[in-house]
């Protein structure tokens, strides 16, 4: 190897080491990319509707950066939403309002003043989730991948609750459930197991694929929950009904007021992300309640996502 070629190779190696040592300082700002969660997140894409035949979903632009986004995309002030033909979207704001945009209109996310409670929740969730918000969303909404290619009536699945084992449920508040598959109407029942009272109690019959169950009259201990469709396809979950004092409290909560929406949001996110998987169903239940009853920005970003194709 010639001296000149050797010097060039050494110079290239030195430059590569310099770039690695500088890390984000070279070519990066350290700010979240489009749709990622970050300190400046001030809105989220709550729903996207696409007419059949439309090619794409929704374009999001920030400076020279552009990407196609679906529900769950976080937005910063100045981000521009540009729906393609056949696309409309609903955007959730921190003040619980929504903004809509539909082709050929364009929406720019405005500068938004946030409350101290929103900022506290933002800081808490950044600390507990960091850049793993998508992982948290998947934990709450994912279904088994191979069901996408099968006939829905042949399975019954609760998003986020697959192969997680026995679930601990706090009986002091309603249990919110949702599922996909099978055929309506659905019966929801609970019974004892492992030597306990094995009497089956039918809690609800519904034509919907969601339910809100009152378990306050149930004794603590082991039991089993079953959701069964009219065609006999069912899902059975082993449960352990517990008293409120057994629920792990959120570490690093920004308030001690357990009745406040801020505390309840932090507790639900903590149970989903940091507590053992035995609390997964309880966490999802709390998030569904917050999203439905309180229009909670953070809960809706995790469990309230919709991407719809209209035919």
Image (cartoon, rainbow, N blue to C red):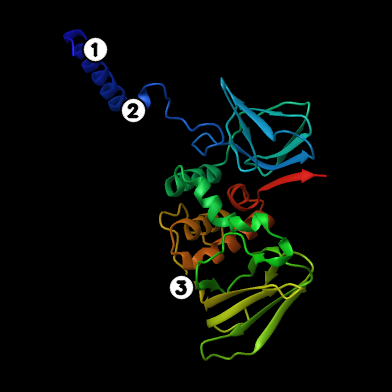
Q: Nearer the viewer, residue 107 or 34?
A: 34
Numbered badge on residue 246: 3
Q: Position of residue 57 (x, y in %)?
A: 69, 35
Please name the residue shown 47% across and 54% down the image.
Answer: 255
- 61 with respect to 244 (left or right): right
Residue 1 visible in the shown view: yes
Q: Earlier in the sequence, mark 3 or mark 1?
A: 1
Q: Mark 1: few, some, or many residues within 10 Å (few <14, many ≥20)?
A: few
Quadrant the C terminus occupies: top right
Please name the residue shown 64% across and 90% down the image.
Answer: 199
Please name the residue shown 68% across and 56% down the image.
Answer: 292
Q: Earlier in the sequence, mark 2 or mark 1?
A: 1
Q: Which residue is mark 1?
A: 8
Please identify the residue farthest to the top as the structure is shown.
4
Residue 214 quadrant: bottom right
Rendered position, 79 above or below 160:
above
Q: How far apart are the two marked residues, 2 and 3, measured between alpha carbons?
A: 44 Å
Label 3, secondary structure: give it: helix
Q: Which residue is mark 2?
A: 23
Label 2, secondary structure: give it: helix
Rendered position, 242 above or below 6:
below
- 229 with respect to 217 (left or right): right
Residue 18 quadrant: top left
Q: Earlier in the sequence, mark 2 or mark 3?
A: 2
Q: Which label lies toward us, 2 or 3?
A: 2
Q: How far apart are the two marked residues, 3 and 1, measured between alpha carbons?
A: 65 Å
Q: Nearer the viewer, residue 245 or 192?
A: 192
Q: How far apart are the two marked residues, 2 and 1, measured between alpha carbons?
A: 23 Å
């Amino acid at each position: 190897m010639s001296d000149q070629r050797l010097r060039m190779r050494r110079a290239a190696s030195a430059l590569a080491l310099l770039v690695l040592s500088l890390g984000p300082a070279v070519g990066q700002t350290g700010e979240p990319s489009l749709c990622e969660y970050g300190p400046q997140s001030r809105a989220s894409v709550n729903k996207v509707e696409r007419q059949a035949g439309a090619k794409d979903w929704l374009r999001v632009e920030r400076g020279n950066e552009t990407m196609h986004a679906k529900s769950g995309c976080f937005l910063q002030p100045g981000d521009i939403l540009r729906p393609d033909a056949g696309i409309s979207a609903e955007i959730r704001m921190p003040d619980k309002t929504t903004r809509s945009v539909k082709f050929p209109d364009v929406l720019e996310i405005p500068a938004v003043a946030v409350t101290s409670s929103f900022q506290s929740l933002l800081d808490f969730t950044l600390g507990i989730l960091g850049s793993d918000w998508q992982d948290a969303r998947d934990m709450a909404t994912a279904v088994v991948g191979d069901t996408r290619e099968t006939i829905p009536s042949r399975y019954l699945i609760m998003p986020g609750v697959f192969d997680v084992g026995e679930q601990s449920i706090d009986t002091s508040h309603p249990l919110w459930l949702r599922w996909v598959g099978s055929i309506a109407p659905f019966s929801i029942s609970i019974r004892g197991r492992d030597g306990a009272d094995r009497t089956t109690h039918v809690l609800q019959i519904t034509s919907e694929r969601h339910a809100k169950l009152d378990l306050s009259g149930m004794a603590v201990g082991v039991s089993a929950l079953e959701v069964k469709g009219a065609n006999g396809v069912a899902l059975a979950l082993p449960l352990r009904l517990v008293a409120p004092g057994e629920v792990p409290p959120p570490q690093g909560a920004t308030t001690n007021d357990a009745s406040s929406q801020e505390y309840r949001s932090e507790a639900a996110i903590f149970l989903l992300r940091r507590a053992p998987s035995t609390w997964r169903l309880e966490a999802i239940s709390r998030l569904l309640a917050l999203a439905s009853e309180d229009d909670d920005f953070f809960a809706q970003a995790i469990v309230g996502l919709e991407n719809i194709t209209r035919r």
